[in-house]
Amino acid sequence: MAIVNSIFTWLMKKRIHQIELFMKYPYDVQEEWFHTLIDSAENTEWGRKYDYKTILTPHLYQERIPIQNYDSLKPYIERMLNGEQNILWPSDIKWFAKSSGTTSDRSKFIPVSEESLEECHFKGGKDMLSIYCNNRPDNQMFTGKGLVLGGSHQVNQLNEDCFYGDLSAVLIKNLPIWAEYYRTPDMSIALMDNYEIKMDRMAEATIQENVTSISGVPTWTIVLAKKVLELTGKNNLLEVWPNLELYVHGAVNFAPYREQFKQLIPSNDMYYLETYNASEGFFGIQDQDNSEEMLLMLDYGIFYEFVPMENICQENPKALLLGEVELNKNYAIVISTNGGLWRYMIGDTVQFTSLAPYRIKITGRTKHFINAFGEEVIIDNAEQALTKACAETGAEIKDYTAGPIYFKGENAGGHEWIIEFDRQPNDFEKFIDVMDQTLREINSDYDAKRFKDMALCRPKVHNAAPNTFYNWLKAKDKLGGQHKVPRLANERKYLDDILEMMKSKI
């Protein structure tokens, strides 16, 4: 196995030279992909509608095609789901990644072409390993297996030619044979629908394996880890898997979970690697082991644009090209892809932390923020405040959500939080004060509204009972996969729903 590990590590490191190429020539690479995408789709129905043959520059492209969202592309996608081809992309589309993004009932079916599988998602997976092997040349990852927490949906058949499932399910079903050999548990368990049974089965199936890496959303990884420790009677995961060296995570901010992982995996040598992989594409990889920024991957068949958040409410907001963005400003991402998404706003917001090369951090969602009083609190603000409050009160957070308290009579407004702790703060009131004060320090709009409680009062925080959010997701039939608790909302729909459930438990 050591020889095989050395060969795989050598192969993976070879890709680094290509990564360095797009880091050095970002505009050339993006320009080339722009022309490739436009040329490829010029004879599709969409390409004929917008006369792609005469689009010669990105600026002309921006002028001619309005920014899209799922609703505007839905009529085209529904026809593709029924088996029609050459609608948005020329190659046959047989796979669709089912995504909810939030706990809303509406599902999105994102087309996954053969090109987007190979040139984007799988390439991203290989690059992730390349970066890891380059940063840790003495790794032993390929001497064991990678534990992968699959999605919550089996691959389902729509008709003779079309299939859908969570992105992870679609990827697992299309993995090459060699990759399947290095993965655990087997497909029948990884793609189970029932997450409660699945966690038990995954724990039982993997405790005897030599697991060297784990990939999964932090919340579900912690649930699995506790099942494993419960089954084995061990104190931490290294007692179960002594060769564990890498944890790959994404989908949610890792900061609130970091302390829990240090307890689950008590090793200073454990490598944590964040990826930015969504149903719509693979966008970023944490390429430095001493930084939480992610390198924006520019050669995956995706052409990027960025809408400044202050323009987001305009009917067809002006989008910036890569060379026009600035540091530390919030942008909504707009993508055109080799899966047939054109000027598609994915709903995520990012900030650039570096422009040479282009590195980003995810700051939230275009719809997940609180701005009921002009305070513009985004998820990144909330995560920083909660991390500081946890550090100062010895707390560990499992889940949370927050929304506005509207003005009522003479009373000022405010923010209402529901927080479920894995470890309770040693001083709950201090936790609230530190969170509030940190928000004031990092967000001047919030601070202005909090001045003398004139517009915003001190936050109201509910200390939720264990498994509150788990039970809520279960009641909504949204356990597992990409379903996440909405962290922030500009209205009270989720907040009131969970509070009502909490009252009924009393």
Image (cartoon, grey):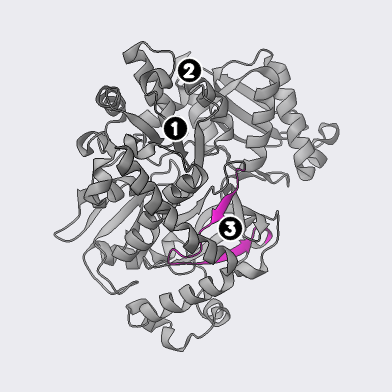
Residue at the farthest top position: 233
Answer above or below: position of 505 versus 106: above
Q: State left or right for residue 401 relative to residue 157.
A: right
Residue 494 drawn in magenta: no
Check contact, mark 3 vs mark 2: CB within 8 A: no
| Viewer-side label of 1, 3 | 1
Q: Is residue 441 visible?
A: yes
User: Which image quadrant for residue 445?
Assistant: top right
Q: Residue at (40%, 81%) from the top-left corner?
A: 39
**Who is closer to the viewer here, 380 or 147?**
147
Looking at the picture, which amino acid does disc 2 mark? Answer: Pro
Q: State left or right for residue 203 relative to residue 416.
A: left
**Disc 1 from disc 3: Cα separation:** 34 Å
Kindly identify which residue carries mark 3: 332
**Who is closer to the viewer here, 99 or 242?**
242
**Who is closer to the viewer here, 266 or 3?**
3
The image position of residue 76, as x and y in percent, is 33, 68
| Disc on res. 466 | 2
Q: Residue at (70%, 61%) from the top-left corner?
A: 326
Residue at the farthest front position: 3
Segment colored magenta = 291-310
Q: What element carries label 3?
A: strand
Q: State left or right for residue 23 relative to residue 5.
A: right
| Disc on res. 41 | none
Q: What element carries label 1?
A: loop
Q: Residue at (26%, 50%) from the top-left corner?
A: 175
Looking at the picture, which amino acid does disc 3 mark? Answer: Ala
The 10 Å Cα crowd at callout 3, few under 14, some 14 to 19, many 20 or more, is: many
Answer above or below: position of 96 versus 187: below
**Disc 2 from disc 1: Cα separation:** 30 Å
